Amino acid sequence: MGSTCVVGLQWGDEAKGKIVDLLCDQHDVVVRYQGGANAGHTVVHDGVTYKLSLVPTGILRPGIDCVIGNGVVVHPPALLREIETLTAQGVQIGQRLHISDRAHVILPYHLAEERLTEESASAADHLGTTRRGIGPCYRDKVGRVHGVRMADLYHPGPFRERLARIVDYKNRLLTAMLPDFVPIDAQAVGDEFLGYADRLGGFVRDTTTWLHQALDQGRRLLFEGAQGSLLDVDHGSYPYVTSSNSSAAGIASGSGVPTRRIDRWIGVVKAYTTRVGGGPFPTEQDNETGERIRRVGKEYGTVTGRPRRCGWFDAVAVGHAARISGSTELAVMLLDVLSGIPELKVAIAYELDGRRITALPAALADFQRCRPVYESFPGWTEDISAVRQWSDLPVQARNYVEFFGRRVGVPVRIVSVGPDRAQTILLRSP
Ligand code: IMP
């Protein structure tokens, strides 16, 4: 086997980190291709808990190289803090981290701009973002006039001149719009970011060329999607999405590696659905069932600590995500969380204005009115966290998983019944 992608098929937090960690043994390089410090992975490794945000999960494995691709937006102080914490936890980073010189930089005014849109937006327009400056930075990237890339930080003269112009523009806008805004000092920000650039210098390079050389040497790449396919800016529940292509569609643009170089396409789902932030969620259970899932599944955001919204598995939304992301196998996570729920439901269609539909509507006004059409299943009472063989799962659990795999149209190959590496059922060799 060669290269693999691991992509979430819901609204993020599908426990992709565990699958990436599990597959590290068969890969040489782990690549992040989009998003930024809005992502949060918790990986338990040899009894130690690591929290990763910008640095790919592969860093926990000696010998694995990790790439932060050109499609990622980098907040240098957040990245440096993460590197320091990992180093303090005994992780040897050495020469294994590679940051794209084309990755865009999140600057202090991006955080202020996000505060502006999130705090002054009327409740109806509030997106519920992670407030890490992700949207404003991508906006500047696509807008071009104000975008700053990692490579620019290594040309102090032109960088300072340009930063002065950008900051002047942003200060005028933000002072007018945010009553408590303290204007940004371009000189101080320049000093600060050139300082970060110095400290990150050993890691920054042309990662696209580096990745192609790695492929030519026969090295196997593992692409690690952040967020989930339903948060994809083009294919997700727009405008309640993140600002990048968080489905597998982002791999080619965000890393420079064409997708024909990828051999294995894994879509990761929870055995139910969660979402943080605003936006349509047809199968949401804002009731005792949702609370139970939240409590048992410890469904609180890794980055923001917000309680996650919880609900039933949505085979309509996951089917859409699996098509977009080209998934050929499913990894089903957190099945153990559903033990003890008497009746489980899977959405197989939506009803919109009396019509049955099985595709996601483009208009938010339509998506918000979709009512799920459910198929129901008897649950199981057994604790399944110690099960290691598919055949040892209660028949109700097997029926449930097999059913949604069929509805999504992608076979289930991995089932996870707990956070530990060992708590994994493989329906084919990893
Ligand atoms: P942003 O990415 O911070 O702009 O947030 C946009 C939306 O994506 C919000 O609903 C966030 O809660 C959601 N989001 C961003 N990153 C993640 C993630 O890693 N997991 C789950 N949701 C996320």
Image (spheres, rainbow, N blue to C red):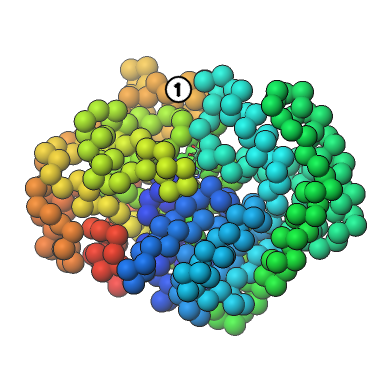
Q: Quadrant of residue 120?
A: top right
Q: Is residue 116 above or below residue 82?
A: above
Name the residue nearer the viewer: 361 or 385. 385
Q: Residue shown at 64%/55% (left/top)?
A: 77
Q: Quadrant of the N terminus?
A: bottom left
Q: Quadrant of the C terminus?
A: bottom left
Q: Residue furthest top?
A: 353
Query: From the viewer's perspective, is residue 243 above or below residue 199?
Result: above
Residue kind at label 1, given as amino acid type: Asp
Task: Please state if 158 lies on the left or on the right of 137 as rendered.
Answer: right
User: Which quadrant of the view contains residue 6?
Assistant: bottom left
For label 1, the residue is 366
- Under tag 1, what secondary structure? helix
Foreground of the two, 93 or 11: 93
Residue at 32% x, 31% y: name it. Answer: 284
- Image coordinates of residue 303 in percent, x first then y, are 47, 47
* The residue positioned farthest toward the bottom in the image shown: 217
As displayed, is residue 283 above or below residue 417? above
Compared across the picture, whether 179 is left or right of 127 comes to: right
Q: Quadrant of residue 204?
A: bottom right
Q: Is residue 304 above or below residue 76?
A: above
Q: Position of residue 132 (x, y in %)?
A: 59, 43
User: What residue sits 21% from the left and 30% below the top?
Assistant: 288
Task: Specify whether residue 107 is in view.
Answer: yes
Whether residue 316 is visible here, answered yes or no, is no
Q: What residue is shown at x 78% (from left), y 34% (from top)?
A: 183
Q: Determine crowd level at label 1: few under 14, some 14-19, many 20+ residues with C-alpha closer than 10 A.
A: few
Q: Position of residue 165 (x, y in %)?
A: 87, 41
Q: Residue 124 location, x and y as percent?
A: 52, 20
